[in-house]
């Protein structure tokens, strides 16, 4: 088995666990390596870079929190490699085990789904692309949480036109517009008062950020629909995907969002505790 390790860049415990995973796997005849983006942060672990393309791995081991998982998803670029998240931070939505359960989780994964008692949970992703007013390609990205078209200058709003399946819906004067997956409904969209949607669902959520207009509701769209956001007016905007700014958008630029044909795959042991994690995250109690 070939394991790709992705670790939190500011968490010393990530180096410690990377060494533990490396030793455990090597003793059993497996190989592991560090992803290219983690070489500097995890160089003290003594583990070599992963040989080959990340899509050739049998497992991605994420040592950190949800941010580390999002980075691993970007690294895979749609490849169907399962991800095992080991939580090193606060409560994580996407991670599955705590640090002390690392070796046990690896052992169960190697045994296979039936003997190890695990399954792969598939999460919907977005396919996001952008082009300038003259049609120039600005890039395309696979997104697990959300794509955000937002203002670049503090103190000003940006004007954005929302287009659904080729028909204009309305124009927003706002700090931005968020297009999120159900997984992303508990991320930025939630802080903008968007709804919480079960990650088992397939839908796209469009949530305005601080709109300067009476209509301030989120839209929950069918996964067959296509969303375009066009920048209108003289104020430019930025495109941010899963927390990373990827493009500057001037007047007439357009961002297209639609469900991706691929999914993100996460290793789960038994029933995933999504609603219990949500309950704990918000300190909800039984009445």
Image (cartoon, helix red, strand yellow):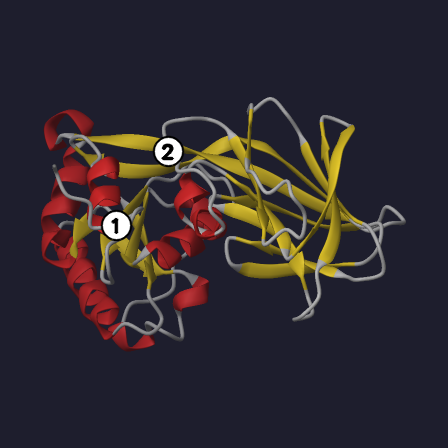
Q: Residue furthest front?
A: 214
Q: Which residue is mark 1?
A: 282
Could you tell me how far apart the alpha carbons at marks 2 and 1 are, in whole angstroms?
17 Å
**Residue at point 56%, 31% (across, down):** 259
Please give the label number shown on residue 6. Answer: none
**Residue at point 85%, 60% (across, down):** 234
The vertical placement of 11 against 221, above or below, is below
**Residue at point 39%, 38% (across, down):** 196
Name the secondary structure under disc 2: loop
Please identify the quarter of the rendering in which residue 240 is found: bottom right
The image position of residue 166, as x and y in percent, is 77, 27
The image position of residue 22, as x and y in percent, is 21, 60
In the rendered view, does 2 fall on the left or right side of 160?
left
Please identify the quarter of the rendering in which residue 256 is found: top right
Q: Which residue is mark 2?
A: 199
In the rendered view, does 55 fall on the left or right side of 234?
left
Crowdedness of circle 1 by 10 Å Cα count: few (<14), some, many (20+)? few
Q: What is the quadrant of the C terminus in the image?
A: top left
User: Cβ–Cβ below 8 Å for labels 2 and 1?
Assistant: no
Who comes first in sequence, dot 2 or dot 1?
A: 2
**Residue at point 36%, 74% (across, down):** 41
Name the secondary structure under disc 1: loop
- In front: label 2 or label 1: 1
């Amino acid at each position: 088995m070939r394991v790709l390790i992705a670790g939190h860049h500011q968490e010393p415990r990530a180096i410690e666990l990377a060494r533990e995973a490396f030793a455990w796997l090597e003793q059993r005849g497996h190989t592991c390596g560090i992803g290219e983006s983690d070489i500097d942060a995890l160089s003290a672990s003594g583990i070599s870079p992963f040989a080959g393309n990340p899509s050739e791995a049998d497992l991605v081991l994420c040592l950190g929190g949800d941010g580390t998982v999002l980075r691993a998803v970007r690294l895979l670029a749609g490849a169907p490699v399962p991800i095992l998240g080991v939580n090193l931070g606060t409560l994580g939505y996407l991670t599955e085990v705590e640090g002390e359960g690392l070796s046990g989780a690896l052992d169960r994964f190697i045994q296979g789904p039936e003997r190890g008692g695990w399954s792969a949970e598939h999460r919907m992703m977005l396919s996001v692309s952008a082009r300038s007013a003259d049609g120039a390609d600005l890039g395309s990205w696979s997104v697990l949480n959300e794509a955000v078209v937002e203002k670049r200058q503090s103190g000003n709003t940006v004007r954005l036109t929302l287009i659904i399946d080729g028909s204009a819906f309305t124009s927003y004067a706002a700090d931005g517009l968020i297009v999120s997956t159900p997984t992303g409904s508990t991320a930025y969209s939630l802080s903008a008062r968007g709804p919480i949607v079960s990650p088992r669902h397939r839908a796209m959520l469009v949530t305005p950020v601080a709109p300067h207009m009476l209509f301030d509701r989120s839209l929950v769209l069918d996964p067959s629909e296509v969303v375009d956001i066009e920048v209108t007016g003289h104020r430019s905007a930025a495109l941010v995907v899963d927390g990373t700014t990827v493009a500057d958008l001037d007047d007439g630029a357009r961002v297209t969002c639609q469900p991706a044909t691929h999914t993100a795959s996460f290793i789960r042991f038994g029933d995933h505790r999504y609603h219990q994690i949500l309950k704990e995250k918000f300190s909800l109690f039984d009445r």
